[in-house]
Amino acid sequence: MIAYMDLNEQADKDFSRARRWTLVRRLARRFRDDPLPAFEDLRRPLRAYNRVRLGTRVVPVSSIVGTVGRQKDFDGSFMPLRASVGERWKRIDLAYHRAEDLPPVSLYKLGDSYFVEDGNHRVSVARYHGTPTLEAVVTEFRFPAGTGRRDRDVQTPDSAARRTKRAA
């Protein structure tokens, strides 16, 4: 006979595993910080102030590389850094296991990269479970005309790694 786990227990187990993954990654990097890139830190030097609402889109989770304001709660892989995010993370995980519909996340697009404005916990749970895409309400920030900047001018740690892979 197979013993079935309560969904609350499963969510607790998933959160604990996600936290362990974070710890293992931090140890592997010899305690080097692996913070999420902050949207404002990249937008300001590029002077990308023009925003255009693109509406609801399906976005690859791998393209979501940073956040608008939760850098201290999640690491560079969107795994939880703090136990304080646990209750909300577990509620999202429960909804995932129950196959409930969740509202779309809200993302800012800068170049080819996306930054979470609202929905960091949903992105974290999606990354944990290996979900390839998420539904998102996207607002794109565009570079001013005449600056000569292009999408590839946005340098995040994740986008630089993707470019290196493509070149190889």
Image (cartoon, rainbow, N blue to C red):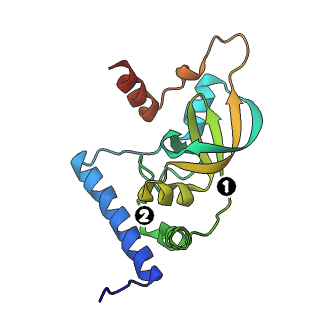
Q: Nearer the viewer, residue 50 or 58?
A: 58
Q: Which mark is residue 163?
A: none
Q: Are marks 2 and 1 in contact (CB under 8 Å)?
A: no
Q: Position of residue 98 (x, y in %)?
A: 55, 74
- Of helix, strand and loop, which one carries label 2? loop
Label 2 or label 1, whichever comes before in sequence order: 2
Q: Label 1 crowding class (10 Å Cα cut-off): few <14, some 14-19, many 20+?
A: some
The three-letter amino acid code for the residue at tag 1 is: Pro
Q: Position of residue 29 (x, y in %)?
A: 25, 45
Location of residue 153 by image quarter: top right
Disc 2 to disc 1, how far (Cα)?
A: 24 Å
The three-letter amino acid code for the residue at tag 2 is: Arg
Mark 1 = which residue? 104
Q: Label 2 crowding class (10 Å Cα cut-off): few <14, some 14-19, many 20+?
A: few
Mark 2 = which residue? 82
Residue depicted at x 60% and y 37%: 40
Residue 79 seen in the figure? no
- Of helix, strand and loop, which one carries label 1? loop
